[in-house]
Amino acid sequence: MGDAGGAGGNNMNMEFRRKLPIPKEIKAMYPISPEFERLREQKDKEVKDILSGQDDRLLLLVGPCSADNETAVLDYLTRLRKTADEVAERVLIVPRVYTSKPRTTGIGYKGMLHQPDPEGNEDMLKGIIAIRETYIRAMEETGFFCADELLYPENYRYLSDLLLYVAIGARSVENQGHRLTASGLDVAVGMKNPTSGDFSVMMNSITAAQSSHMFIYRNWEVVSKGNPYAHAILRGYMNKKGQSLPNYHYEDLKLVCDMYHKAELQNPAIIVDVNHANSGKKYLEQIRISKEVLQSRTFSEDVHDMVKGLMIESYLEDGNQPVNGTVYGQSITDPCLGWDKTERLIRELAEMV
């Protein structure tokens, strides 16, 4: 079978199950209309204008830790649409609808890409189709284009016409493949600080993403142009004892601003992820932390200009549950802020901008 042959002749300890359709084929099977292509271009410009300082609205990336249930996700987005329209003069909302989940040990629910049914068997082809269908429904029913994590760089092309924002996670940000792929994307890319918390690693990843590179991507030799909208995401960090420590305080924000000045990067921007290690996964702390970050913007012109937005984990119901849980709209991964608290927080943040 050539390159897809068995383990014996190719020294590969894996089974090649089937060859997947290429992105062009999947897009042809599940297309979007020219009208929505134009709408995405408009929304893409709005995100980039915020990151470049041409638009002074707050960028708010808010949504479930993992998009495990299409019906619940669409219910959430429908509610979010109404709130987004009401605060649109001060806040641009991009829903985070994460479909691939990094796992610290590689074990556990890995997201819709792996398991369209969280309790079913893994099926990557069904997962790719399920994700695309979910994003298309989100677009058609709510007018939202979403954000996702770039966990597998080679999969981005399946969704490149549907995403407004991409994040490189704390476990991936030191990986050269992720950095080089980010340099070739024509979409805003947030580079998270690594789990160690080392800001220099994060800044190096932004430098790499903003630079041009030659590399291999999906069996092609490619040359990227560099992504001027690659930027920092602060998500807290873990110390050597496994304890969560925050990096959202004023002093942290000011330090990253100073590092941006020295690095002379394009469009210096910071997004603060108010959950994960910043909250110690105490999801209710996201309310306080969000407000503290916006308050910090009032103490320094640099911090005000560079802190462009927040990332909040939110779903229909507070908290989380096991994968086989039965609470509709409650996270099966990290605990999230419920809808009522989320709606109230969005309105309060809009008043602070």
Image (cartoon, rainbow, N blue to C red):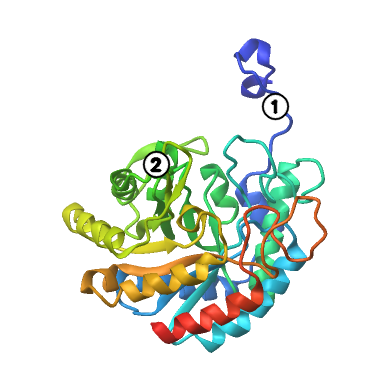
Question: Where residue 287 appears, x then y in whole percent?
Answer: 51, 71
- Vertical relation: 344 (above or below) 21: below
Number of marks present in the image shown: 2
The residue that disc 1 covers is 16
Q: Residue at 40% across / 63% down in the picture?
A: 271
Q: Quadrant of the C terminus?
A: bottom left
Three-letter code, disc 1? Phe
Question: Where residue 184 appears, x then y in whole percent?
Answer: 40, 50
- Vertical relation: 340 (above or below) 274: below
Q: Is residue 197 left or right of residue 87?
A: left
In this rendering, does residue 139 appear at all?
Answer: yes
Using the rendered view, name the quadrant where residue 66 is placed: bottom right
Three-letter code, disc 2? Ser
- Residue 273 image label: none
Residue at the left extreme, as displayed: 262
Q: What SS does tag 2 mark?
A: loop
Using the rendered view, name the quadrant where residue 327 is placed: bottom right
- Residue 196 image label: 2
Frontmost residue, 289 versus 64? 289
